[in-house]
Each structure stands twice: as C-alpha cells, then as structure tokens.
Image (spheres, rainbow, N blue to C red):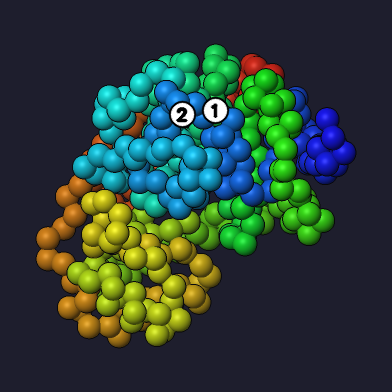
Amino acid sequence: MNMYTNTLRESSDDIAQLVAQSHQVSKNIIFPFADNRAFLTQLFTQHECDDVSLIAVGVATPDVAIAADKANISLTECVGNNPFNYSLEFVLRKIKNGDIVYLANPHKISGANFSLTGLRKIVEKNRDGLTIIDEYYFDFFGITGLKLLENFDNVVILRSFTASFGIYSSDAGYAIASKQIVSTCKEWPLQKKISTILRKTILATMSNIDVSEERLHEIREEALRINKSLAQIGVQCRITATDFLLIRVTSPKDVGNFLKTNKVDVENLSGYPSMKYYIRYRIESYFSNDRLIKSFNKMSSEFYAIQKPEKRSITLRRPHGESVERQITAEELLVAKVKERSEPIPKINSKHLFSIVE
C-alpha cells in the first residue's frame, strides 16, 4: 500500500465510522467516495472482462455512460415499452448470469422503480455477476435493497450524502457492500480524495437530519401544488418518488425555450426512448416553483396542450414488496409515499444491514 492510498484511507475512515455509528453497522462494509462517476468507473473496470456485459436497466444516464466508456466496457440499455414502469420479466430475459447490472431505484430520469421482491429476483438471476443498486433517491422513495446483503455478497448499494438536501454541486456518496468488495475498493489506485470543503459538506448533512426531513416534506407539498396548478390549465404532469416532475407537452423544445426566457430551467427528455413529449423539472423553492406556474400561464397553449391523456401506467410501490399497478392520482401517490416513510421501522438482524424499512 503506497502513501497516496494511506492518505485516502485516512481521509475517509472517519466518515465511514460516522455512517457506521449512525446505522449501527461495521464500518468495514461502508466505502465513502468523493465522486459517483469516478467510483462507477473503477467499479466497472474492476469487474470488466471479455465475456461480461454491462446492463443498464432503463435508459443509461450520462454518469453511467461516461463511466462505462472510461472503463472501456460495452454498455447495453435494457429499455422496455414503458419508461415509467420497469418490467421485471423483460429485465430478467435480458440479463445473463455473470453480467454487471446497474439499476437506479428509482430511475434518475423516469422515476421507474422496483420493489424489494423485484430486486431480489434480479440478484438471484445474476448470482455470479455484480448487481449495483443506485439508491440516490432513497430518502424520497423509502424502499431499499439493503436486506439483500444478508444473503448475497455480489450486491453494491449506492447512496448519496447530499441528494435529500438539494446540493447538486456535489456527487459524494457511499457504497454499502460485502467486506470483500469494500476491501478491494480501498486498494484502488488514483482515487479522488475527499477534500476539506467536501468533508465539511458531508459532516453538515449527517448532522442536520431535521433539515433534510423538512426539505423532503416541502418537496412533497410543492409537487402536489405544482401538479394541481398546471392541471387547471391543461398541462399533464407525472409526480415521481424523487425531487423532479415529468411534464408532458406538445413541443418540449418550444416549452423549454419559453421557460428559459423566464429563468426556469428544465431538461428536454425527447431524446430518450419513449419520452418524446416530456420535459423534467426539478422542484425548487416555493417562489421558484411559482415562476414555473406563472410561465405556463403566460405560455401559448399550443406549446403544451395534448388532448390524449398518457395511458402508460406507473407502479405504486408499498413496503414489503407489494405493489399496485394502475394509473393513480397525484394525491394518492403522495399520501402513499408519506405513509411509507412514517411506518414503524423494523429491526433487521444482520450486522451487514441498516435497520430501516424495506
């Protein structure tokens, strides 16, 4: 082990210890990282070989695509007909045992998600491979695959330190995996060091849980308010278990340009499969969200009015693997998600797991 690796280990050990203490687990299964993309690149590189495929469930987000390119591994997107609803059967058909499987739960673009039961079936199918479950939006979603670590040593769970705080300038997070995988991660050369400023940011997020909970509540309330206001003028929205709304419009380009002139930022999703008419809006403060609503009220309806409703279903996930697949209202979705997060937290008797709801 060289001096550089020693320095990196010292810079992250105390953070790993704090995470471990907060969840009452061993720090040997936790690996903090400064940059998600750099971590994925090294993880892909570590497991890359001639007969291994990298399968991205859903459309591949830029961070995954760039990491795959840097790791010199071919990437295959596993995309069904409905981007808002993962098809477990479709995914299982596409995966072969021994692959590297990456899935964000929920998806960072569409909000699609799996239940714990679905995650387990994927890991069982890929028993000899590596399954990476990115839980960037866990604090919004409330369902995790961490219980899988009790029976499988080839699963890596990713979490963000800053997502629930809306700190998008940082992509720092941590991995939870078997001791063997974490031990290997610690030996990687040329890892990005956690800087002093980043360390302060991470420590601040870990000591301000009340602030995080307050923001999560505000996001839920604002999602419902925006959806209701836009629906009144005929704009179709999808609420997701994340910090963004999906808005269906006639012309994403014209809507995006109009909103930009009113200092409202959105992402045009028309380049993604089966999302031709969608833009994505990240929910912000009350006043910023008001600017979005007012901008739509000033906008020509020919830019956004679509007569036919979106018929592709979304799946509402519940704790313990149950799900209801149907078109649901924004109110039903929000009430259910709040209920999930407020239910009693069961104890999971394993030294490798957080004690949290499934």
Q: Residue furthest left?
A: 308
How far is mark 2 from mark 1, CA to CA?
A: 8 Å
Could you classify mark 2 by the number of other residues whose Cα lies within 10 Å: few (under 14), some (14-19), or many (20 or more)? many
Q: Position of residue 37 (x, y in %)?
A: 57, 48
Does the residue at mark 2 contact the one at mark 1 (Cβ under 8 Å)? Answer: yes
Judged left or right of residue 334, residue 88 is left
All told, the count of numbered labels is 2
| Amino acid at dot 2 | Ile
Judged left or right of residue 272, residue 262 is right
Q: Is residue 146 visible?
A: yes
Q: Residue beneath label 2, please?
A: 100
- Above/below status of 274 relative to 72: below
| Amino acid at dot 1 | His
- Front position in the image: 145 or 287: 145
- Above/below status of 284 relative to 187: below
- Front position in the image: 126 or 202: 126
Q: Position of residue 175 (x, y in %)?
A: 63, 35
Could you classify mark 1 by the number of other residues whose Cα lies within 10 Å: few (under 14), some (14-19), or many (20 or more)? some
Q: Where, quadrant-wise, is the N terminus in this rendering?
A: top right
- Snapshot quadrant of residue 136: top right
Residue shown at 46% from the left, 37% from the top: 73
Residue shown at 40% from the left, 39% from the top: 75
Q: Which mark is residue 15?
A: none
Q: Residue beneath label 1, please?
A: 47
Q: Position of residue 244 (x, y in %)?
A: 43, 58
- Front position in the image: 295 or 90: 90
